[in-house]
Every structure is written in structure tokens, then in C-alpha cells.
Amino acid sequence: MQPATSKGEGTLSYLVPSILYTIVTVIALGIVYPLVITGIGMLILPHQANGSMVTVNGKVVGSEIIGQLWTKPQYFQGRPSAAGKGYDPTSTGGTNLAPTSKKLMDATKATIAALKKTNPDAVGEPPMDLVTSSGSGVDPDISPEGAYWQVPRIAKARGMTADAVRAIVDAHVRGRTFGILGEPRVNVLDLNLALDAAKS
């Protein structure tokens, strides 16, 4: 006949495996797995694994996948940002305001007015992607329409012809991913760097 185990011994028989399982899981999934995946990424796709950083003359000027604020009239502007205090990659997110929110409506009207003021020669209303922020708040792309709408301001600020600026936009339009996913887009950083590289 087996002696009855005490209550403490019974609890210990469950507690020890639970603690060991937690330790093994934390090490395997919290340390080993991230290191292995990061290592594979660095070997196969080093540019993307390091944040898709863009350098000019050895200096990092931004990332292909993170939008940034452009305020000078000679540069294309991206989408408005609600991330942190604006374009903050450590605090991404949208406005979380409902479509019927008065605050959102007022902010949208103010954005449209500001765009029209800084783009007096633009034809028609500003495209919606220049008026509304993205879900992340750091979208690096705008629609081709959003770029073309800004062409008159860019051409005037740089002393270029509108056709020359439009040609740069044409050369930087990216189609749908795999031909079916998403919409055509233009990377704002790439576009502005191309403008700087072009001779007026």
C-alpha cells in the first residue's frame, strides 16, 4: 500500500513542471526564436531587416517604409500624420475619430484649406490621401493623383517646367503589388530625392 502524499508534495508536483515549462518557453520563444529569425533576415534581406534605410553620400536621410514631414515648398508632401506628435514611428496609429466626429470634420476642413493655400495653382480639390491620415500615421506613399496635384507648386519653387516635374512623378509610380494588391503609389522620399538629383 502506497503512503498518502502530503498536500504540499501534491502542489509541488504541479508547480515544478509549470516553472520549468515557463523558463523553457521564455528562452525558446523570447530569445532563441527572435535571434534566429533576425539572423535569417539579416542574411537573406539585410536592407529590409535594417529598416530599409536610405542614404545619400553616406548619410541616412530616411526610410523607404516610414513617412516623414516635408514642409519646404520645393518638396512633395506626404499624408497627414496622427502618429504621436506627427510621423512618430514609435507611436504609430490613426486618429481613432469617427467619420461623424466634429473634431475630425474641423481638422479635415483645416487641412484642405491649408493645402489650397500652399498650392494655389493646383487644379481641383486635393486628393483624399493628402487630406486624411493613414492607419499607421507613417505611410511613406501617396497616390499618383496626390503627387500630380502638387506639381504646380513644386515646378514654381524649383524653377522647373511642370512637364519636367510630372515626368519625374511618372518615373516613380509603382504599380499594384503582384499586379493585383493595393493601389498604384509613389514613395515620397524617393520622389523628393529624385527632384534633388534632377537639374532644373
Image: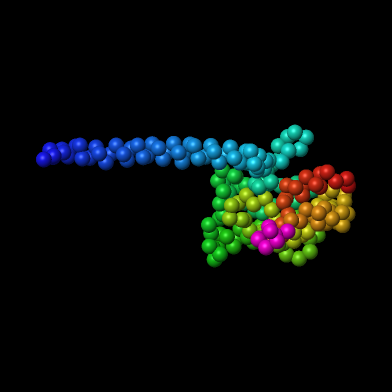
The image shows residue 4, relative to residue 93, as above or below, that is: above
Question: Image check: 83 left or right of 14?
Answer: right
The residue lying at 56 percent from left, 64 percent from top is 99
Q: Measuring from the top left, give residue 117's x and y in whole percent.
A: 74, 57
16 or 118, which is in the foreground?
Answer: 16
Q: Position of residue 33 (x, y in %)?
A: 50, 40
- Residue 130 place in picture, x, y as percent: 68, 57
Q: Is residue 133 magenta?
A: no
Q: Residue furthest front?
A: 1
Q: Residue at x 84, y 48 (%)?
A: 158
Side of 111 where 74 appears, left or right: right
In the figure, 156 relative to 127: above or below? above
| Magenta portion: prevailing SS class | loop
Residue drawn at (49%, 37%) of the image: 32
Q: Is residue 158 left or right of residue 22?
A: right
The number of numbered discs placed on residues in the rendered structure image is: 0
Q: In which quadrant is the N terminus drawn?
A: top left
- Read off the magenta span: 175-182
Q: To which quarter of the image does residue 62 belong?
A: top right
Q: Nearer the viewer, residue 47 or 88?
A: 47
